[in-house]
Amino acid sequence: MLKGRTIVVTGAARGVGLEIARTCARHGAKLIIGDILTDIGEAATQHLIAAGASARFIPVDLENPDSIAAFAKSIADHEGEIHGLVNNGAIATNVGGKMFEDIDMALWDKVMRVNVRGTWLMTKAMSPLFQHGGQIVNVASDTALWGAPRLLAYVASKGAVISMTRSLARELGPRRIGVTVIAPGIMRNEATDYVPAERHQAYENGRAVPGPQMPEDITDIIAFLLTPEAIGLTGQVLPVGNGFVFN
């Protein structure tokens, strides 16, 4: 499905991002993995290579515009062209639990810099490398569709990612670059271990298809969205959460 295509995945050192990378590799993609977690990202990339993947790790800090620019330059110098970008990197851990009036302003600003500005700047930096069209998949959250409480900074940031996707789809469409956004529900992985058990349970009971959602449950959908055939879905938000919310 992705044979011969170079795919960039941010936030891919662990968790959902790493599962996205694994699935893209399984479908034949050449991978560029970006993450701020350098040691973990390097180790994950070596595991992918040992399993037969073509992969390269480049450290990147989505909060730092210079880091994003250096990330893009490395790809331009080594690969030259890309065919897909998955904007998965984001801050989620330890950003919830407080009512809106109790959120620390420094945390709010950091979440916006990483989740919103980082997605914009990464897309801006990568877009010149789509020389013959391609696909961008932004990873949002279904919390932005149903309005999860005590999570306002994160919800607002993911709502912004959904809205940006629609504008980007119109701006990049003439270059045959499709832009879609997936909005998964809460998943069971190391990145969500801090989430209270009752919230996990509420999700798992409230899905049309009851039960936990794992990172690998969304990755084949993302792989399809990275194919040329997915261009017809550009601008769309897909709530991939086993039916917790419908869009």
Image: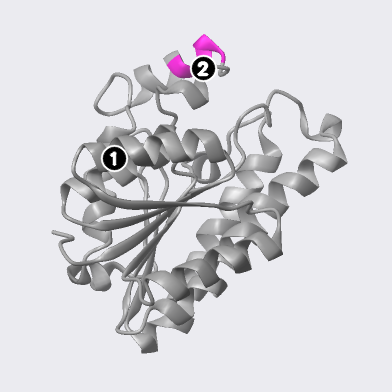
| Nearer the observer, 90 or 158 | 90
| Nearer the observer, 110 or 45 | 45
Q: How far is disc 1 from disc 2 in space, using C-alphas?
A: 24 Å
Find numbered disc 1 in the image and state the secondary structure of the residue it sits on.
helix
* Residue for badge 1: 48
The x, y position of residue 107, in whole percent, is: 79, 39
The quadrant the N terminus occupies is: bottom left
Q: Is residue 79 above or below residue 20?
A: below
Residue lying at 64% horizontally and 51% vertically, measured from the top left? 61
Residue lying at 51% horizontally and 11% vertically, measured from the top left? 198
How crowded pointer 1 is (Cα within 10 Å; few <14, some 14-19, many 20+) is rated as many
* Residue for badge 2: 193
**Image check: 240 left or right of 57?**
left
**Image check: 6 left or right of 136?**
left
Q: Is residue 152 above or below residue 78?
A: above
Residue lying at 23% horizontally and 48% vertically, measured from the top left? 25
| Nearer the observer, 206 or 159 | 159
- Magenta span of residues: 196-200
The x, y position of residue 70, in whole percent, is: 60, 66
Residue lying at 56% horizontally and 13% vertically, measured from the top left? 196
Is residue 40 visible in the rendered image? The answer is yes
Q: How many marks?
A: 2
Q: Is residue 214 above or below residue 110?
A: above
- Name the amino acid type tagged 1: Leu
The x, y position of residue 104, in whole percent, is: 85, 35
Q: Is residue 245 magenta?
A: no
- Identify the image quadrant of residue 31: bottom left
**Image check: 27 left or right of 132?**
left
Label 1 or label 2, whichever comes before in sequence order? 1
Is residue 123 visible in the rendered image? The answer is no
